[in-house]
Amino acid sequence: MLQHNIDPKYSQFFLDTCAFDPKYTPEDCAANELWSRYEAEKISLLLAHSNQREIDHPNTPKWVKNKALSMVFTVEVQLNSEELSRLVKLEQLLRGNAQSERHKDDARHLFEASKYGGYFVTTDHRILKMADEIFQQCRVQVLKPSGLIHRLDLGDGAYASLPHC
């Protein structure tokens, strides 16, 4: 994955709901570190309105639902023709050759992050594999939780080291 120069000091950080509670190391530790920084008001973590269906899903843990309530940053608005065109192209990129519509929500999450932010944090391997193409199309940097910790710490001149969970 290419490193894109979006300064984290001047960006919003949008989360995919899977980044709340990763099930593997080191992303579980990185997510915990992001939550610590969020709760200490050192960083702002946001959700797009398009995450609501995932938040409302019966399998979403209650603690995720509770945290998410205060994090939704965007509201659904009618898109102009240029925005709609960008969203459709993003949907096509994520869908690839699949016939399914299941990638529409992910495309909307990324679109909202590109419109209001600069970073999209996820543990979705399919999205992470397309990070460079996504950046080329909509100028949002896709990172894992550990990647965001690394970028934040580089801004302070330090190298990110994650504490053991």
Image (spheres, grey):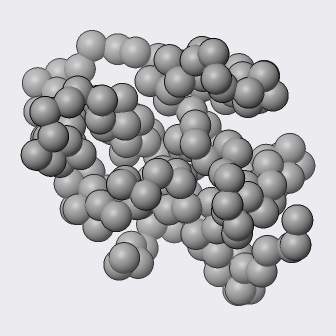
Say left or right for 135 vs 80.
Answer: right
Can you give x and y, in whole percent of width and height, for residue 18 in the image? 58, 42
Q: Is residue 85 visible?
A: yes
Quadrant holding the N terminus: bottom left
Q: Is residue 9 visible?
A: no
Total count of labels: 0
Can you give x and y, in whole percent of width and height, for residue 69 in the image? 71, 20
Is 78 located above or below residue 67 in the figure? above
Instruction: Say which residue appears at 86% left-offset and 44% top-offset.
Output: 39
Foreground pick, 5 / 88: 88
Say left or right for 1 vs 45.
Answer: left
Can you give x and y, in whole percent of width and height, for residue 117 in the image? 47, 46
Instruction: Say which residue appears at 37% left-offset and 53% top-offset.
Output: 127
Quadrant holding the C terminus: bottom right
Foreground pick, 71 / 129: 129
Can you give x and y, in whole percent of width and height, for residue 128 in the image? 40, 60
Instruction: Say which residue appears at 24% left-offset and 45% top-offset.
Output: 94
